[in-house]
Amino acid sequence: MTYLLLFYEFFKTGLFAIGGGLATLPFLYEMADQYPQWFDQSMLADMIAISESTPGPIGVNMATYAGYHAGGVLGSIVATAALVLPSIIIILLIAKFLSKFSENKLVQSSFYGLRPTVTALIAAAGFEVVKVSILTLDQFTASWNVVDLFDVKALILFAVLMIASLLLKGKGHPVLYIAAAAVVGVIFKF
């Protein structure tokens, strides 16, 4: 039953997460709430970090990792296959009919409507990552002290790396940012 449920959830994610791997994140956060035995939001934040730092599409990496955690090797195969299957089907259909519909006003209008939707999904996913990584809502709601709203060390790390990336204007390999964040994270944890 777990494998059928994994297939259903990841097929649904692959079908509706338009816009790339980051667009899968709202669906994964929903899964974390709905199926905590698979993974929780904290584990999801770790999955995001690992998926972002490994080669390959983030959505596929996330599906493989989440599927493995939920159902072992077979779970990772099922989740990954289910995630990519809708894209394969859609690409085959588009390839067959693209030349016929590329100038169609309805098709162009649909893509016009999809762009802000994809942006909103990615922004929502970004907020969820911030919520798990920087905010400490449990401590805040217990004390209602604004200082308790943030994990100060994580906020400092975020600010320093954000400022560095803005000052460097994206120069430097992303691996340098990941390595710097890992080193500072280790230092902060001690």
Image (tube, rainbow, N blue to C red):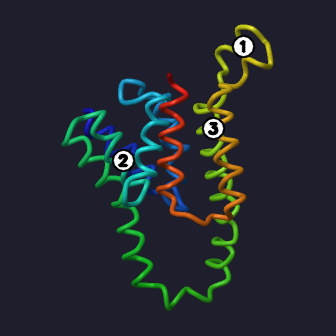
Q: Quadrant of residue 149?
A: top right
Marks 1, 2: nearer the viewer:
1
Disc 1 to disc 2: CB gap under 8 Å = no
- On the image, the x and y values in percent for residue 22 come to 53, 53
| Amino acid type for the residue under numbered disc 1 | Thr
| Amino acid type for the residue under numbered disc 3 | Leu
Q: Residue at x 30, y 34 (%)?
A: 69
Mark sitting earlier along the chain (1/3): 1
Mark sitting earlier along the chain (1/2): 2
Residue at numbered disc 3: 157
Q: Residue at x 50, y 28 (%)?
A: 33
Residue at numbered disc 2: 63
Using residue 43 as the reference point, say whether residue 130 is left or right of it.
right
- Secondary structure type for disc 3: helix
- On the image, the x and y values in percent for residue 36 come to 42, 25
The disc at residue 141 is 1
Marks 3, 2: nearer the viewer:
3
- Secondary structure type for disc 1: helix
| Amino acid type for the residue under numbered disc 2 | Ala
- On the image, the x and y values in percent for residue 108 come to 65, 79
Q: Is residue 164 above or below residue 171?
A: above
